[in-house]
Image: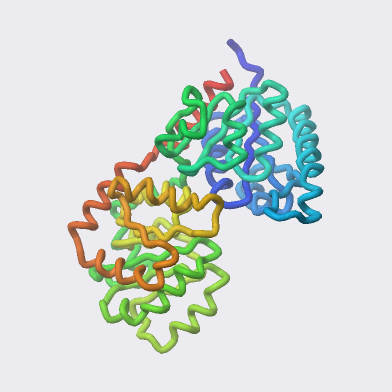
Amino acid sequence: MNHKKPYRFILSGGGTGGHIYPALAVANEIRGRHADAEILFVGAKGKMEMTKVPEAGFEIIGLTISGLQRKITLKNLLFPFKVLSGFLSARRIIKKFRPDVVVGFGGYASGPIMLAANAKKLPSMIQEQNSYAGMTNKRLGRKVNRICVAYEGMERYFPKGKIVLTGNPVRDDILQLEDKKQKAREHFNLDTEKPTLLVLGGSLGARTINDSVIGDLSQVVKAGVQLIWQTGKFYFQEMKTAAEGHDLTNIRIMEFIREMDLAYAAADVVISRAGALSISELCLVGKPVIFVPSPNVAEDHQTKNAQALTKKNAALLVRDSDARRDMIPVALELLQDGEQQHGLSLNIKALGRPQATKDIVNELMKLVA
């Protein structure tokens, strides 16, 4: 069968990095296989995908759309009209672009575009990053042809016959960490022998995680542990000031870490939030992890994500409400315990899916065919 070359794809999703980065990874994989493929992103106006996607070299169209607030406000009364207008814009985009297949990665914009694709009976797929499916994806699951998931047991939310367990797409550079430890520690100007802790609160930072570090910074110093600490941009100045007066010889306080692969390579133990993408990345990194799930997310899905790992003895979990008391003591104890580190490391690595992006694009090409 000859195909009216080139292939045409619409990818949709955004609002947070957790939806954008998987979509970009998939777009790059498509481009790697079919250099002439036409790829169009659809996002939500005013959200971060509107800058991130063009930076990565892809075209994006923004829909006017917003989420439903929980209380009765003027915004909520306008919500049905916004949904309708989003849907009509989405229909126009599909009519004009004529995609072979449409893929949704979650976030506000993927709802209208996927519904418009289904109305046109176009092949469609969603990629669900979390162990818990959001409202939009649950509804779309009944209509799309294929659902790529990252966790087992997703038939709770989706028709079993449509589910493919692929894992989440992540950046390539973190797949080769084996021989980088020496180089990585030199990069951060750290001792190559001393135990090293990496603390990540996400790109914007996490108040609880930062407060927990600053509260026990003297314990970290006393234990002779090296610390690479990403505060996030909102907290950087405040934490830097709060850390003055401590011996910071072994402490690196950073607003944002560009070379994540080197930060992972340098670390013996990692403390992180439990967003789906961070987890997928950490499974491939294979270091012992302590998760401090954010309580400020829909349906507390970060806790559910983390529990999927702690059940398999592949990570430790400290609740956000206990972090100020427990987070650093748990980390210091783990840094002393080589055997536990080794066990956690083996178990989390077993859950990694380095082929996720390729597997998702394979499923996509089956739909096109």
Above/below status of 211 relative to 185: below
Residue that appears at 44% across and 66% down: 321
On screen, residue 294 versus residue 261, left or right, reads right
Residue that appears at 72% across and 30% down: 116
On screen, residue 207 versus residue 39, left or right, reads left
On screen, residue 319 versus residue 108, left or right, reads left
Residue found farthest to the front:
72
User: Residue 292's spot in the image, x, y percent?
Assistant: 42, 61
Q: Tell me, yes or no, if residue 173 can be seen here.
A: no
Residue that appears at 22% across and 51% down: 343
Q: Quadrant of residue 365?
A: top right
Colouring: rainbow
Residue that appears at 65% across and 54% down: 48
On screen, residue 204 versus residue 189, left or right, reads right
Please tell me which residue lies in front, 152 or 195: 152
Q: Tell me, yes or no, if residue 147 can be seen here.
A: yes
Residue found farthest to the left:
339
Quarter of the figure that contains the N terminus: top right
Query: How many callouts does the rendering have?
Result: 0
Quarter of the figure that contains the C terminus: top right
Please tell me which residue lies in front, 128 or 56: 128
Residue found farthest to the top:
1
User: Residue 222's spot in the image, x, y percent?
Assistant: 27, 81
User: Residue 107's spot in the image, x, y percent?
Assistant: 62, 45
User: Residue 310's spot in the image, x, y percent?
Assistant: 33, 50
Above/below status of 176 relative to 3: below
Please tell me which residue lies in front, 279 or 356: 279
